[in-house]
Amino acid sequence: MSPLLSVKDLRIDYLTAGEPFTAVRDISFEIQPNEILGLAGESGCGKSTVAYALMRLHKPPALVRNGHILFEGRDVLSFGDKELRAWRWSEVSMVFQSAMNSLSPVMTIFRQFYDMLRAHGTVSKAQAQERIAQMLEMVGIPSDRMHAHPHQLSGGMRQRVALALALTLKPKLIIMDEPTTALDVVVQREILQEVLRLKDELGFSVLFITHDIALMAQISDRIGIMREGKIVEIGTTSQIVTAPKRDYTRSLWDAMPLLAQRPEGMAHAV
Ligand SMILES: Nc1ncnc2c1ncn2[C@@H]1O[C@H](COP(=O)(O)OP(=O)(O)OP(=O)(O)O)[C@@H](O)[C@H]1O
Ligand SMILES: [Mg+2]
């Protein structure tokens, strides 16, 4: 099977005053169709820097110094503006850590979906309304909430809306950067269950980023462990959980509260 996404020797620097800071050091990994790859590691190890670069959303002072990002074999780093606009959200989309980074506070939910739909093809208001209602209901939000502004919704609802927005154009890959960190455990569980259900229904791949390795083990097929800009270990979830090769990976497990250590049968059992 050829990979959906292939990242090769990716290096990203932040060009700040003085010496450039290398936040991502020559990392390589692949994501297969329909696969959930988890990316874990302590705060500041470079997870979000990778996520933004994959979507070509990185901005100065971040600079990709080296490497390739291939999406279905196409070289994402060489895309022109037009190609990028067509590709982003329709083939790969992102759910950010805070829904407020995904949603504009000044526009109604309807307007945000409508703008995205229109940017990717001709659509009437009535057609948009129907599609938005369908997407909101799919993530458990009553469709009449499309006329609300984000601040009129709870944090959990906003994150569901961000998920619906990310799924609307049926992308093949969704990048989720700490999608549930700001939410309480019950809502977090509900949303992740929703992601797994939708993945079965729609068929997409996920890059799931979190510093919560226990949560990651519950939903990922494979896990990559990052430290100081490098991927120090990558393998199947059961290998990373039960037979980590690196002391660092083991130390992440050891740092988990006892209850979270459920090595057996965790995958897809949120
Ligand atoms: N705009 C910036 N300018 C300079 N350095 C930055 C910038 N953004 C991030 N960095 C640095 O790059 C490194 C990686 O940051 P990044 O946000 O990718 O980490 P992360 O793994 O996502 O952390 P967290 O788990 O806290 O979200 C950090 O050392 C950070 O200080
Ligand atoms: Mg981050």
Image: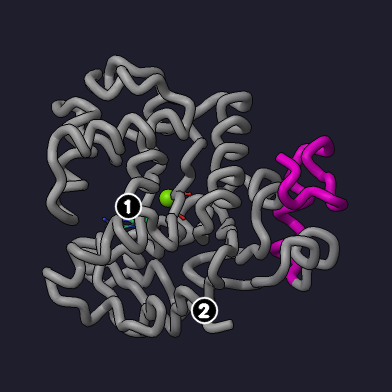
Secondary structure beneath label 1? loop
- Residue placed furthest toward the top: 152
Circle 2/circle 1 CB separation < 8 Å: no
Instruction: Tell whether 135 sits left or right of 150.
Output: right
- Residue 188 lies in quadrant: top right
| Closer-to-camera residue (260/18) | 260
Q: Quadrant location of the N terminus?
A: bottom right
Q: Is residue 234 visible?
A: yes
- Which image quarter: residue 35? bottom right
Q: Position of residue 143 (x, y in %)?
A: 35, 23
Q: Residues within 10 Å of mark 1 (few under 14, many from 20)?
A: some
- Where is residue 66 drawn, in percent x and y? 33, 84
Q: Which residues are the magenta region?
A: 246-270
Kindly identify the amino acid type of the residue bearing the numbered disc 2. Answer: Pro
Left or right placement of residue 47 versus residue 191 in this view: left
Q: Secondary structure at mark 2?
A: loop
Tell me: residue 212, above or below residue 18: above
Residue 130 horizontal/vertical position (percent): 28, 33
Provide the residue designation for mark 2.
Answer: 3
The residue indicated by pointer 1 is 169
Say if 6 sits above or below 131 in the image.
below
Query: Is 76 contained in the magenta span?
Result: no
In this view, the residue in front, 148 or 57, is 148
Pinpoint residue 226: horizontal percent, then vertical percent.
Answer: 56, 65
Q: Residue furthest right?
A: 264
| Quadrant of residue 236 within the rendered picture | bottom right
* Residue at position x 39%, y 67% in the image: 23
* Residue 1 in the image: above or below residue 166: below
At 18% across and 33% down in the image, what residue appears? 126
Quarter placement of the C terminus = top right
